[in-house]
Amino acid sequence: MMADQPIVQLTNVNIYQGNSLILSDVNITINRGEFVYLIGKTGTGKSSLLKTLYGDLSLREGAGQVVGFDLKKMDWKKVPYLRRNLGVVFQDFQLLTDRNVHDNLKFALKATGWQDQKQMEDKINDVLDKVGLKTKGFKMPYELSGGEQQRVDIARALLNSPKLILADEPTGNLDPETSDGIMQLLFRICREDGTALVMATHDYIVLQKFPSRVLRTENGQVIDNAAVNFA
Ligand SMILES: Nc1ncnc2c1ncn2[C@@H]1O[C@H](COP(=O)(O)OP(=O)(O)OP(=O)(O)O)[C@@H](O)[C@H]1O
């Protein structure tokens, strides 16, 4: 990928679910290190947009590239390569319950082709340190709080040094204090690593406390830099 190429670029994109046009004429550019919220009423197409970005919905009309992958030319065989270059954080992500944090991360590394033991250990230490869980690698998932589990999920998303993280309601189940900690962590990752991040959320308190660019799905369109109505 060229250094100055945007991390995400969609041009005149129409997004469908089956035969229904969900979002039309979507034009979005997201650059390195940008933190972007994705808001909008339920059913207006946030998930459809995220799915387009990670190759779960194929691009039928318009042009798009994500972390250097051309969405139009993408066939199902290339999707795993795109996914490896993205970090995905979902509210309902489940850790494997039969193994500790360290082994959960190691499982994810092996699943994406890592083999060298020393490199895997270094990477696991590195991402656990980044999310503030350096000493918790031996813990089993059920021994972690909700916020700690979300941090492990973020650590997992960071394993392959993605240029883009897609996060769907990462603070959805967390109390305000824990959610602040997660937001500070996500903003730090953008700032320090230059990772771009798109976060779908319904959490207006978070939006108010941690202001950033907002995309809003509304009436079949994506409105960029949408003013947030806190009323
Ligand atoms: N697999 C599918 N097949 C057909 N229609 C779908 C499918 N998934 C979603 N839709 C429709 O597409 C529209 C947009 O849904 P989408 O899930 O993208 O909205 P959303 O903004 O993410 O909603 P929420 O906030 O509830 O997650 C809805 O009308 C929905 O019914």
Image (tube, rainbow, N blue to C red):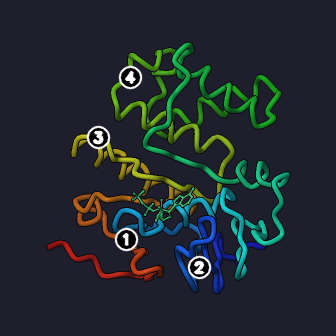
Judging from the image, what secondary structure is the residue with disc 2 in?
strand
Is label 2 in contact with label 3 (beta carbons under 8 Å)?
no
Give the residue at x 42% y 74%: 217
Q: Which of the two labelled residues, at mark 2 and mark 1, occupies the earlier sequence position?
A: 2
Judging from the image, what secondary structure is the residue with disc 3 in?
loop
The residue beneath circle 4 is 144
The image quarter containing residue 212 is: bottom left
Q: Answer few, some or many: residues within 10 Å of disc 4's Cα (few below 14, many 20 plus, some between 14 and 19).
A: some
Q: CA distance from mark 2 to mark 4?
A: 37 Å
Q: Which of the two labelled residues, at mark 2 and mark 4, occupies the earlier sequence position?
A: 2
Q: Answer few, some or many: residues within 10 Å of disc 1's Cα (few below 14, many 20 plus, some between 14 and 19).
A: some
Q: CA distance from mark 1 to mark 3?
A: 20 Å
Judging from the image, what secondary structure is the residue with disc 1 in?
loop
Amino acid type of the residue tagged 2 in the rendering: Thr
Judging from the image, what secondary structure is the residue with disc 4 in?
loop
Give the residue at x 25% y 62%: 204
The residue beneath circle 2 is 29
- Front-lying residue, 4 or 141: 141
Q: Nearer the viewer, mark 1 or mark 3?
A: 3
Amino acid type of the residue tagged 3 in the rendering: Leu
Q: Quadrant of the N terminus?
A: bottom right
Q: CA distance from mark 2 to mark 1?
A: 15 Å
Q: Quadrant of the C terminus?
A: bottom left
Mark identifier at residue 212? 1
Q: Is mark 4 within 8 Å of ligand 1?
A: no
The image quarter containing residue 113 is: top right
The number of callouts visible is 4
Mark identifier at residue 83? none
Give the residue at x 30% y 63%: 210
Q: Which of the two labelled residues, at mark 1 and mark 3, occupies the earlier sequence position?
A: 3
